[in-house]
């Protein structure tokens, strides 16, 4: 393999890694510290960098999550959620907060329909 080809491969790999990292909010990566101990209340920030922070929250049954929307519009949809999921936050929201109650055990995966790949999870134990 020629040195030019090796250099081209390294440059391509570096650029591809940087591009994937810039997509933000997707996959199962966790942003912010996550305490595995269930809590009664938590706040999730919907950020201008297209991430929910933290993107996983562990709640006790009947616990609440306050979704705090910053300057950029976001929404929250519980696609394929178990029975007992709270109502979606369908209207694009910015500069306000909405609190939802989770009364049933289960795993609730949510996403922002305005920003594909922006996801989070609430686990109710």
Image (spheres, grey):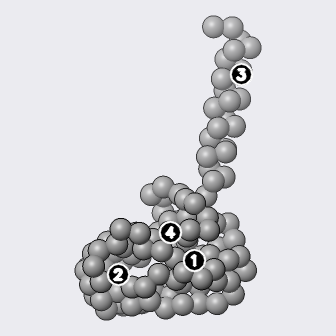
Q: At 29% across and 74% down in the image, what residue appears?
A: 82
Say whether disc 2 or disc 4 marks the residue closer to the N-terminus. 2
Q: From this viewpoint, which residue is outermost toward the front?
A: 90
At 63% from the left and 80% from the top, the residue drawn is 92
Neighbour tally class for label 4: few under 14, some 14-19, many 20 plus, Cα within 10 Å = many
Q: Is residue 119 above or below residue 89?
A: above
Q: Which of 8 and 110 is in front in this view?
A: 110
Quarter that holds the C terminus:
bottom left
The answer to whether the residue labelled 2 contacts the one labelled 1, judged by CB atoms less than 8 Å apart, is no
Q: Is 67 situated left or right of 95 in this image?
A: left
Label 1 residue SS: strand
Reading the image, the residue beneath label 1 is 75
Q: In which quarter of the image is residue 9?
A: top right
The answer for how far apart the CA atoms under marks 1 and 3 are is: 41 Å
| Residue 111 - label | 4
The residue singled out by tag 3 in the image is: 8
Dot 2 corresponds to which residue? Answer: 85
Q: Which of marks 1 and 3 is nearer the N terminus?
A: 3
Q: Residue at x 34, y 72 (%)?
A: 81
In the depicted structure, whether residue 84 falls above or below residue 79: below
Secondary structure of the residue carrying numbered label 3: helix
In the foreground, 48 or 32 = 48
**At which x and y percent is residue 115?**
61, 64
- The residue at the point 73 percent across, 80 percent down is 71
Alpha-carbon span between mark 4 and mark 3: 37 Å
């Amino acid at each position: 393999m020629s040195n030019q080809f090796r250099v081209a491969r390294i440059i391509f790999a570096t650029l591809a890694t940087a591009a994937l990292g810039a997509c933000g909010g997707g996959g199962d990566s966790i942003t912010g510290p996550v305490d595995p101990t269930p809590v009664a209340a938590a706040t999730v920030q919907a950020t201008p960098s297209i991430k929910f922070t933290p993107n996983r929250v562990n709640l006790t049954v009947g616990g609440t999550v306050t979704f705090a929307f910053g300057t950029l519009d976001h929404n929250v949809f519980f696609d394929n959620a178990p029975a007992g999921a709270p109502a979606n936050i369908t209207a694009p929201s910015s500069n306000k907060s909405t609190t939802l109650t989770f009364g049933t055990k289960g795993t609730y995966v949510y996403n922002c329909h305005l920003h594909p790949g922006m996801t989070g999870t609430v686990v109710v134990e």
